């Protein structure tokens, strides 16, 4: 077997995966590019394990004496990479689905990591209108009318207290 051909194919697959990670905007395609890179590593591990490197090094072949078994380190590492890749796909797709539910898009460029909008709905964060109750809309500047007897501070209730209470509410009672 000539190991140069699988090495070149693995290098091309890995390069294609790096290109996909750097250039793609869709999160699903980025995950596919990462999987392509992991499969290139798998090909490299299996090829390096199967290649007769003992001839190039001038050492006796492992297992040639009939006593020493051939180590299968490349195949074992490949199985570990496959397990890790499967877990990565599961977690990655869960993140992508949650991103689509919250933002309405899976474009990586539209994801804002510096702001947090837990219930923005299926619209992009850039076009999301200000919600009621946020710091930008809360307070007396909104023009909302207060009930008679309501206090000015948002931490306390009016003189009657919250519904179902026996007496006036204080800030410490909450």
Image (cartoon, helix red, strand yellow):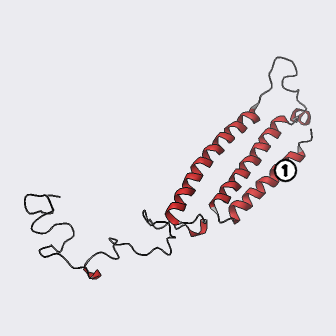
Q: Residues within 10 Å of mark 1 (few under 14, many from 20)?
A: some
51 displayed left or right of 94: right
Task: Give the structural element (helix, strand or loop) at label 1.
Answer: helix
Determine the residue positioned at 38% across, 72% down: 131
Determine the residue positioned at 86% across, 50% down: 8
Determine the residue positioned at 50% across, 66% down: 122
* In the depicted structure, whether residue 75 falls above or below residue 159: above
* Nearer to me, 136 or 145: 145
List the single residue furthest toward the left: 167
List the single residue furthest toward the front: 164
Q: Quadrant of the C terminus?
A: bottom left
* Nearer to me, 45 or 65: 45
* In the depicted structure, whether residue 57 falls above or below residue 91: above
List the single residue furthest toward the top: 67
59 displayed left or right of 73: right
* In the depicted structure, whether residue 132 falls above or below residue 55: below
116 displayed left or right of 50: left
Q: Tell me where residue 142 sits by quadrant.
A: bottom left
Q: Residue at label 1?
A: 9
Task: Find residue 96 and report its horizontal and vertical position in percent.
Answer: 57, 57
Q: Tell me where residue 80 sits by quadrant.
A: top right
* Nearer to me, 6 or 29: 29
* In the depicted structure, whether residue 140 falls above or below residue 43: below
Q: Quadrant of the N terminus?
A: top right
Task: Find residue 148 and report its horizontal and vertical position in percent.
Answer: 13, 76
* Nearer to me, 39 or 145: 145
Task: Find residue 154 and report its horizontal and vertical position in percent.
Answer: 21, 70
Labels in figure, total = 1
């Amino acid at each position: 077997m000539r190991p140069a051909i699988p090495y070149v194919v693995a290098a091309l697959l890995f390069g294609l995966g790096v290109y996909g990670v750097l250039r793609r905007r869709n999160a699903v395609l980025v995950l596919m590019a990462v999987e392509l890179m992991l499969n290139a590593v798998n090909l490299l591990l299996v090829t390096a394990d199967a290649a007769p490197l003992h001839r190039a090094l001038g050492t006796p072949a492992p297992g040639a004496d009939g006593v020493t078994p051939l180590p299968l380190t490349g195949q074992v590492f490949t199985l570990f990479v496959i397990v890790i890749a499967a877990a990565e796909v599961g977690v990655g797709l869960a993140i992508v689905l949650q991103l689509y539910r919250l933002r309405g898009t899976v474009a990586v460029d539209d994801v804002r990591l510096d702001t947090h909008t837990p219930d923005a709905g299926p619209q992009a964060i850039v076009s999301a209108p200000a919600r009621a109750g946020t710091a930008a809309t809360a307070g007396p500047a909104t023009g909302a009318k207060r009930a008679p007897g309501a206090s000015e501070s948002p931490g306390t209730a009016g003189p009657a207290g919250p519904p179902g209470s026996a007496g006036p509410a204080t800030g410490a009672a909450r």
